[in-house]
Image: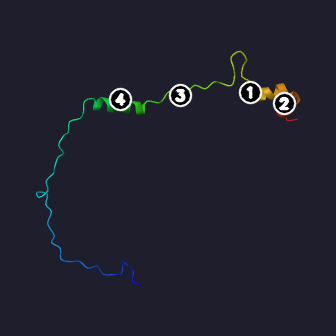
Amino acid sequence: MPSVLDTPELVEDVETHELTPHGLTIERPQPHRTRPGFWRTLAHRIAEYFTPAPRKQHASSCHAPRPCETPADLLARQYPNLYIRAFCGV
């Protein structure tokens, strides 16, 4: 089976037209009127898009009167012997 690249291409006589810059015309689009409030709405939505959303504040796991306890503090309080051995390298 012959490859597609190996087959010769049949080209019929086609008239070629010379394209000159004088023969080309540039059509400018006609300006359209926008509905009332369009630009104001657009500016508002762009401002909303670039404004960061307010972040939700999460309740901390530590409550007010008692100070926060780190894992090391918890280990020292619950297992003092293990705490001393772990941090002293004994």
Q: Amino acid at mark 4?
A: His
Q: Position of residue 76 (x, y in %)?
A: 82, 27
Q: Is residue 34 left or right of residue 70?
A: left
Q: Which residue is farthest top? A: 65
Could you say whether the residue bearing mark 4 is in a helix, strand or loop?
Answer: helix
Q: Amino acid at mark 3?
A: Arg
Q: Which residue is farthest front? A: 35
The front one of 22 and 89 is 22
Question: Which residue carries the number 1 mark?
Answer: 70
Closer to the N terminus: mark 4 or mark 3? 4
Alpha-carbon distance for marks 4 and 3?
Answer: 21 Å
Q: Position of residue 36 (x, y in %)?
A: 25, 30
Residue 27 higher or lower than 39, as above or below: below
Q: Nearer the viewer, mark 3 or mark 2?
A: 3
Disc 1 residue crowd, few under 14, some 14–19, many 20+, Cα 10 Å: few
Q: Nearer the viewer, mark 3 or mark 1?
A: 3
Question: Which residue carries the number 2 mark?
Answer: 83
Alpha-carbon distance for marks 1 and 2?
Answer: 13 Å
Question: Which residue carries the number 4 mark?
Answer: 44
Q: Is residue 59 left or right of residue 77?
A: left
